[in-house]
Image (cartoon, coloured by chain):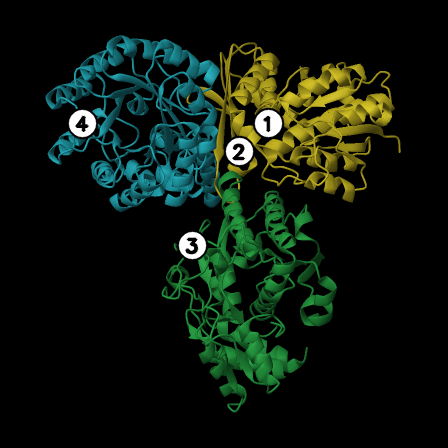
Chain colours: A yellow, B green, C cyan
Amino acid sequence: MNQLKVAILGSGNIGTDLLIKVTRSPYLQCNVFIGRNLASPGIMKARSLNVQTSADGIAYIVQHPACCEIVFDATSATAHQEHAPILKTLNKFVIDLTPAKIGILCVPVVNITDCLKQMNINMITCGGQAAVPIAHALAMTHHEIDYIETISNIASRSAGRATRLNIDEYIHTTEAALKSFTGAKITKAILNLNPAQPCIHMQTTVFAKVKNPQIEKLRHAVGAIAEQIQRYVPGYAIIVPPMIENDRIVVMVRVKGLGDYLPEYAGNLDIINCAALALAEAYAKTKLHPPQKEKAHEICFAQ
Amino acid sequence: MSTATLDLILNDYHHVTANKTESLAAIKNTTLVITGGTGFVGTWLAGLIAFLNDHHAFNVNLILIGRNIEHFKMTRPHLAKRNDIQLLSSDIRYLAELPQETNWLIHAASNPDNRFHASSPMETMSIIANGTYSILRAIERCADFKMLLNLSSGLIYGSQPMTHPAIDEHYIGAPKCGTVSSAYAEAKRFAETLCHSSRSQARMPVITARPFAFIGPYQSLERPWAINHFIKDALSHKPIRVLGDGGTIRSYLYASDMAFWLLSILTRGQSGEIYNLGSDEAVTLKELAAMITALIDPAIEIQLSTASNQPKNSRFVPEITFAQNNLQLAVTTDLHHALKKTIAWNTL
Amino acid sequence: MKSVLLSDPTLRDGNHAVSHLLTTEQIAAYCQAIDQTGMPIVEIGHGNGLGASSLQLGLSKTADFTALKVARDHLKKSKLGVHVIPGFATIEKNLKPAIDLGIDVVRVASHCSEADITEQHIKYARTAGKIVYGVLMMSHMVSPAVLVEEAIKMQSYGAEGIIFMDSAGHYLPEDITKRVTMLVQSLSISVGFHAHNNLGMAIANSIAAVAAGANMLDGCARGFGAGAGNAQLEVLVGVLKRMGYETGIDFYKLLDAADLAESAIIKEMPTISSASIVSGLSGVFSGFMKPVLRISKEFNVDSRDVFFELGKRKIVAGQEDIIIEVAHNLAKRNQTDIK
C-alpha cells in the first residue's frame, strides 16, 4: 500500500496520540517519532509499535531528510519557531499543533483546499476547531454577523500545564480565528475548566448576534457541516441545535475523544489531533493520487 | 496449595466481609490494578477480589503487575489461572502505560525486606521514587480513573518514642536524613509527597495508607521480622531467641483485615486523606513469644539476652481511630487468633 | 484593637442583580457617596469581572473602560479595585488597559480548584506595582485541605492576600471557622471572606471568619449582589464596630451611601427567594439565578429541577451556557414522559 512518510516531533501525550492515529491511517506511515527523552512513555509506546524513535530532535530530520514528507510538530511554540525555517528549507509539509501560528490557520471542513497549497499549517485551538465550523455555517447562511462568541468547557484534568500557562493566548487565537473565518465584526472566546468527576467531555457553545436570523437555514447548514466533521471527528455531536434564546443564536456541541492515547474525556485535545490527521491524509492523497478534476475538498470528505 | 490451606483463607474472607460486602459496592464491574500485585499484600487483595467475584458477583476485572510473574504462577495457581485476573510483567519504573479502562489502582510495589534495603539502597529508593512517578503519569491517561491508593509506610514517622503509645496520622516525625538505613523510609516519604503533588497538579484522586506490621498466611517465615523468626523457630521446636530484654513493642494486623481495610480505604476514602493501617493491639516481643509458644508448645524455651549492653528497645504501634471512625472499620481478628491461623496455615 | 479591611463590590457583584446594566450615572453617584466613608476598596465592573461582558454572561451596559474611568474620577480616597477571571479576561485586552487607566487593586479569581491559571495575571499585576489579591470562587466545592493548597499556590505567585468566596451562599458558620483556621495557619498573607446570603448566613459567616482570624471582608450596600445578595455592608460594619473591630469607616456616611444605593441603583431589594434557597442548597453559583429563571420559563421546566441538576453536575461559575443544555434536556425528558 502506498503511504506517505511522516515524522512526528514531540513525544508527549499529543504526539503519542497522533502516532497511534497515523499508524491506523492507510495513507500515512510514521517513519520516525522524535522526542527529547528516550525513556519517556511516548517513546516507549512508539517502540512497542515498532516505530523508529530518536531523541535528537529536529537534527534527526536534518540528518535524514528523506525520512519524511510530512512533519507534525507537537512540541512547543518556542520550539516550532526554531523548527519552521529549517523544515521550510527541507521543503516539508508542516502541520503545526503548537500555538506558534507561523502559517495558515486550518479548520479542515472549512478551508482544507487552501491549506493544501501551503507548507506550514497551524491547527489553531480546541475551541477553534469546535466552533469555527459552526461559525462558518452561520456565515454561509447570513450576510452579516455582528458578533460571535464561543465558550469551551473542558475537564480540568484535560488541561495540562501548557494550557494553563497560555489561556490568554488561547483566547486571542480563537477570537482571531473566528474573525478570519467568518468576517464577524466582533468575536469573543471564553474558556472554562470544570473539575467534576467523572471528567466532563468537551462542550462548546457558539452564541451569535445577527440581523434577521435564519434559524431553519442555519439548522440545515449546521447539520451538514457536523456530518462532514464527524468523518474525521466521530465524537463531534450537536447537542443543542441552532435556536434563539434571549435574543441570541445559540448552538451547542459536544466533542467526545477517540481515546487513542488521550482519555476519551479529552475531546479538546483529540479534536485538534483528528483535524491534523485529516489534513495530513488529504495532503497524502494529493501526493499519492494527484487529483485531475476532483477538488481536494471532495477527496477529503467523500467516501 | 492444598485445599485445606485455601479453605482456611476462604474462611478468613467470609469472616472479614460478613454483612459488609455492600460497603465495597463501588468496586463492582470496574477494573482494579495492583502494582506489586504478586507480593503478600497483592496476593491477599487478589484473593479478596476473587472471593467477592465468586460469592457476591462483584465482577471486578483484576490486573496484577509484578516482576516475578512466573513465580506467582507456580506458587499461586488458584489465583494466576483465573479468568478475572490478568498478570502483567513489568519493572514499575519503566511502566509507560496502563490499560485505559483502569478505574482503581493500589500501588503496593516495593520490597519491604530490609536486607534488600541494606544491600541495595539505591535500587530500593529508585523503585519507589521512579516507580511511583511512572504510575502517577500513567493513570493520567485513563478514561475514568477513580482513586489511587498509595501504600506508604509507618516508617515515615521516624522512630517512635517508647513513651509515645501510638502514632496518629498528624504525628510529625521523620527518619534521619542522610543515612543509608533511612533509604526505604525516605523513599516512601518522597512517594507520599509526590502522590499529593499529582493530586494538586494533575488533579488525580489519591489516597494514602501507612502500613505498620502484618501477619498471616502467604507471608514467608523467612522474612526477617521477629514474629516470623519466632513462629519458624517454634514450629521447629527450637528455642525462641529474643533480642534484648524483649521489651520492644509491636502490633500486627491480620492479613484479612489488612485486605479489607485497603479495599475500603480505596473505595470509600476521600482523596487526599491519609490512614494508618495496622493493629492497635500492642505487645512486647516477650509477650509475643509467649503467645506463640502457648499455641505451639508451651515447653519451648524463650531466651532473652542476658548481655549487659542491651540493644535499645523500640516501639512501632499505630493509632487507628481515624480509619475506625471515618470509615467504620474494625480489627476483626485479634493477635491471638491471627497467630493461631498463621501457625495453622504454616503447618497444613 | 483588631482591624478588618473591608472591600465593597456593590457595583460589581451588584451588577449581577441588574443583569450587568449599571449606568455611568449610577456608578458616579455611588462612588461619590462611598468615597466619603473611608471605605478602603471599592470594586467596579461586570459581575464576572473585567472582560466578562459577553453573550454568555450578559453584555454590560457600561463598558469596562468607561465604568473604571467614571469610578476613578469619583474615588479620591477609596482604592479602586477590579475582579479578574482568567479564561474571561486577558492581560492584553483587559488587565493592562485597566492598570494603565489607574486602578489600585487587582483581585485575580479562579474556580477554587484551579488556582494555577491565575499565575500569569497575578504576576503581571504585581510587576505593575498594584495591590494584588487571589480569589477562590465557589470554594464550597473543594475540601478545606485542597482550598489551602490552592491558596498556597496563589500566595507563591505573589498574591498579598487570599479571599475565598461563598459564591453559592452554601456555607454554615462552622464551615467558615474550619476553613479560615486552616488558611490562617498555612498562609503568611491575609485571609479574607466573601459571603452570599442564600441561606441567610452572610453576616454570621462573615463574623465567624473574623473570629477565626480572617482580616478582610466583602460587603455590599443593602446586600446588593448576585442571587440572594451579599453580606449587607452597613449591617456588617455596624456589627464589627459593636464587636470591637476597627474598620476605619464612617458609619453614618456609610448608612447615607446605602440609602443612596437603595434609591438610585437597586431596583429590587435583595431577598432570599425560593430559587435562591434552592441554589444555595444545591451549591450552584448565585449569579445563575436570573438566567436559570428565564431559561426555565422558556423551556417550560421547573427552575428548581434545573438548579439541582446543575448542582449534581458540579457546574462552576462562568458555565451559564450549560443552563440551556440542562433545560433543553429536562424539556425533552418531560416530553417523552408525557408520551
Mark 4 chain: C
The percent coordinates of residue A198 (x first, y second) are 52, 45
* Discs 1, 3: same chain: no
Residue named by callout 4 = C247
Q: Percent position (x, y) of residue A274? A: 68, 30
With respect to residue A241, does B285 lie above or below? below
The image quarter containing residue A109 is top right
Classify mark 3: helix, strand or loop: loop
Tell if the residue under mark 3 belongs to the same chain as the one under mark 4: no
Classify mark 1: helix, strand or loop: helix
Q: Chain of mark 2?
A: A
Please give the count of numbered marks on the rendered protein: 4
Respond whether the residues carrying marks 2 and 3 are from the same subunit. no
From the viewer's perspective, is residue B280 above or below residue A256?
below
Q: Element under label 4?
A: loop
Compute the Cα span from label 2 to label 3. Answer: 41 Å
Badge 2 is on which residue?
A154
Q: Measuring 23% from the left and 18% from the top, which residue is drawn there? A: C265
Residue lying farthest to the bottom in this orientation:
B299
Amino acid type, residue under disc 2 in the picture: Ile
Q: Residues within 10 Å of mark 2 (few under 14, many from 20)?
A: many
The chain carrying label 3 is B
Q: Is residue C52 visible?
A: no
Chain letter, disc 1 residue? A
Kind of residue sitting beneath label 1:
Cys
Of B183 and C285, nearer the camera is B183
Disc 2 with disc 1 on a shared chain: yes
Q: Which residue is mark 1?
A: A126
Q: Is residue C89 above or below residue B137?
A: above
User: C56 or A161, which is in the foreground?
Assistant: A161
> Where is the C terminus of chain A found, in terms of image quarters?
top right
